[in-house]
Image: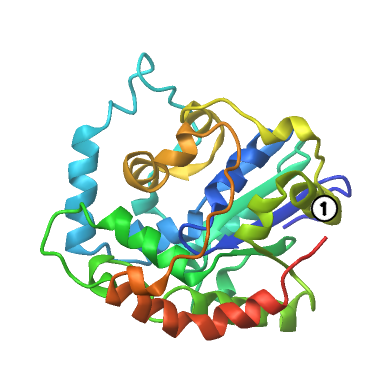
Amino acid sequence: MAAAKTNQTRVILWGVPRCVSTTFLKCLTFVEDSVCWYEPYLQAQLFGTDGSITPFLKEILSQMKDQMPPLDDSSQLLLGDNLYEASKHSLSWVRERLEEEYPGKKLIFIKDMVQGIDGHYNALPTGYRHTFLIRHPLKVFASLKKMWAPMPGPKRKLQEMIPFMPPGYYFKEMYDLVEYVKKEQEPEPIIIDADDLLANTPRMMRAYCDTLGIPFNDSLLTWPTGHEVVLTKWITGKDGLVIGIQLVHKSTFESAEFGKPTPIPNPDELPEDVVEVASLSMQYYDKLYEQRFQC
């Protein structure tokens, strides 16, 4: 990759599920002269030539596509040339695209999930700052259970319900990536806890942007509802877009701002499988939380 211009900032935000990372991306979408990618590594892992889509996920995707307005019908959705077929591409293709020149752009921002790069650190792009977004495991897994419960099939344990849950339940994968980045690139990467972000959004977002050199003002903290901004600006695979609109990010697309933090759920009031997976994840969450960005 050619050397990035000195006034151009390149950042990746790695998240775990249900940690408001897509809302974070939506916020920074409105930075002037920015390019925003939505989960290119995860989509390459799930749908691309390096991955193998599970039969269950394939069935769910098919059902969701049937419910979607046609993506090529501009009277219903604003189709942009930023949509690609993830099934034709690999992790190395993602790296090559992220390392391309983006003339005239001030910010190249990528939002992705940690399981998308786990075990494939050689596919990480050069020239980027790596940042991380975490959330209390009880909140993450309670939300995941609620989201996936209506899906077709028998009512299984959470570990079996999600067809692409990684073996470390996201938090080990996050911890491993943070340790890799600390060793190979920057000793103190930015780690934000979602509750800190939601408790004082203007201060946290401004501090995050100021630290990384991202242009920021408070007008970025409110935005139009709907998913038109996705179709016109985010670079994303079509399959990932369908799942995002139909299942994973409905509340984000309907939102006009960041929400407020909610209390940590009482484990006694949660399903056993949620508590089990959260308990296995706490050791990694606690280590990450100790390193969190504070301002």
Seen as rendered, the residue at the extreme top is 75
Residue at (44% x, 65% y) in the render: 265
Where residue 205 appears, as percent x and y from the top left, is 74, 48
Q: Which residue is mark 1?
A: 207
User: Is residue 101 visible to us here?
Assistant: no
Where residue 161 appears, as percent x and y from the top left, is 24, 67
Q: Is residue 43 left or right of residue 213?
A: left
Q: Quadrant of the C terminus?
A: bottom right
Which of 147/237 is in front?
A: 147
The residue carrying pointer 1 sits among few (fewer than 14), some (14 to 19) or many (20 or more) residues within 10 Å by Cα, namely some
Residue at (79% x, 64% y) in the render: 294
* Vertical relation: 240 (above or below) 253: below
Residue at (43% x, 26% y) in the render: 79
Where residue 1 appears, as percent x and y from the top left, is 72, 58
Residue at (50% x, 76% y) in the render: 171
Residue 178, image quadrant: bottom right
The amino acid marked with disc number 1 is: Ala
Q: Could you say whether the residue bearing mark 1 is in a helix, strand or loop?
A: helix
Which of 101/60 is in front?
A: 60
